[in-house]
Amino acid sequence: MKTVLITGASSGIGEGLAKSFAEDGWHVIACGRDAARLEALHQHSPNVTIRLFDMTDRDACRQALAGIGADLVILCAGTCEYLDRGVVDAALVERVMTTNFLGPVNCLAALQPQMRAGSRVALVSSMAHWLPFPRAEAYGASKAALSWFAQSLRLDWEPKGIAVTVVSPGFVDTPLTRKNDFAMPGRVSVEQAVAAIRRGLERGKNHIAFPGGFGLIVRLLSALPAFLQRALLRRMVRS
Ligand SMILES: NC(=O)c1ccc[n+]([C@@H]2O[C@H](COP(=O)([O-])OP(=O)(O)OC[C@H]3O[C@@H](n4cnc5c(N)ncnc54)[C@H](OP(=O)(O)O)[C@@H]3O)[C@@H](O)[C@H]2O)c1
């Protein structure tokens, strides 16, 4: 039986991935902080075992993940908070950077002694850092940092036989986006997100981005000259 370790398995994309892998007969190590939601996942399938820890706590990560080996590690847990009208809230930025960047780094550090050749790590980033969207200073920076880290790590772990995948979703309908009060073009369901991620992982892709249409638009916008890009993004600034 193959083993997949998934952080953020108590909600949204991570929960969808955990159910999907468990239904396909994988042993799923489901990680998060919400005991009740993770217990429900275990009730859903006996293939699911649970690890409860806050990934921003390095010691807690080390203790919870000590000795755990997995064929596939999906670091999906994350958060999103936006700045309000350009007010730089240092505590907010720290929360987002700590959760989205240092959290996965803590998990990688705890898991690396057990990672074997032939295994793969997937880090869930976002398209949010492909363009400098207003209000996404903290979220975009955290995902840019995570993606950069992953791309360097891919080179350093290649000789060990460990593959690194970056996952860049557009908008997915989860509790994280349900609190957004703006239009979310191209938003897909968790089921669609899970299918896209699993397809990409099965193909051994270094980079998985979905949905394709929205991703193409963001990519094209990011290739525009800076003055044009700024003119378009300025329309999204709240007065
Ligand atoms: N939804 C989207 O449109 C979208 C788009 C691009 C990228 N993403 C990325 O996809 C990932 C999953 O997002 P989602 O939409 O599925 O969000 P979600 O439904 O809010 O789930 C977030 C998950 O992260 C876990 N988590 C958060 N902080 C944690 C911490 N300190 N320690 C341990 N676990 C923690 C939560 O677990 P507990 O509640 O149990 O702590 C929860 O399981 C995130 O990295 C997000 O940035 C999402």
Image (cartoon, rainbow, N blue to C red):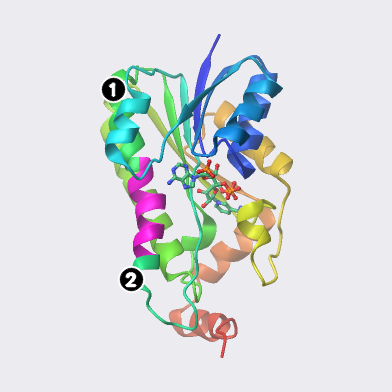
Residue farthest along the bottom direction in this orientation:
239
Q: Residue at x 33, y 17 (%)?
A: 67
Number of residues whose C-alpha sits closer than 10 Å to that of mark 1, classed few (under 14), some (14–19) or many (20 or more): few
Q: Earlier in the sequence, mark 1 or mark 2?
A: 2
Q: x, y (%) of residue 4?
A: 51, 23
On whether residue 94 falls in the magenta region, the answer is: yes
Q: x, y (%) of residue 51?
A: 47, 27
91 displayed left or right of 183: left
Determine the CA span between mark 1 and mark 2. Answer: 38 Å
Discs 1, 2 touching: Cβ within 8 Å: no
User: The N terminus is located in which quarter?
Assistant: top right
On whether residue 103 falls in the magenta region, the answer is: yes
Circle 1 sits on which residue?
160
149 displayed left or right of 136: left
Magenta-highlighted residues: 93-104
- Which of the two residues, 195 or 10, is positioned nearer the viewer here? 10
Residue 67's place in the image compared with 218, above or below, is above
User: Identity of the amino acid at label 1?
Assistant: Lys
Number of residues whose C-alpha sits closer than 10 Å to that of mark 2, classed few (under 14), some (14–19) or many (20 or more): few
Dominant secondary structure, magenta? helix
Circle 2 sits on which residue?
90
Whether residue 75 appears in this view of the structure is: yes
Q: x, y (%) of residue 196?
A: 65, 39
Whether residue 154 appears in this view of the structure is: no
Secondary structure type for disc 2: helix
Secondary structure type for disc 1: helix
Residue 147's place in the image compared with 112, above or below, is below
Q: x, y (%) of residue 119?
A: 42, 21
Which corner quadrant of the image does residue 141 belong to? bottom left
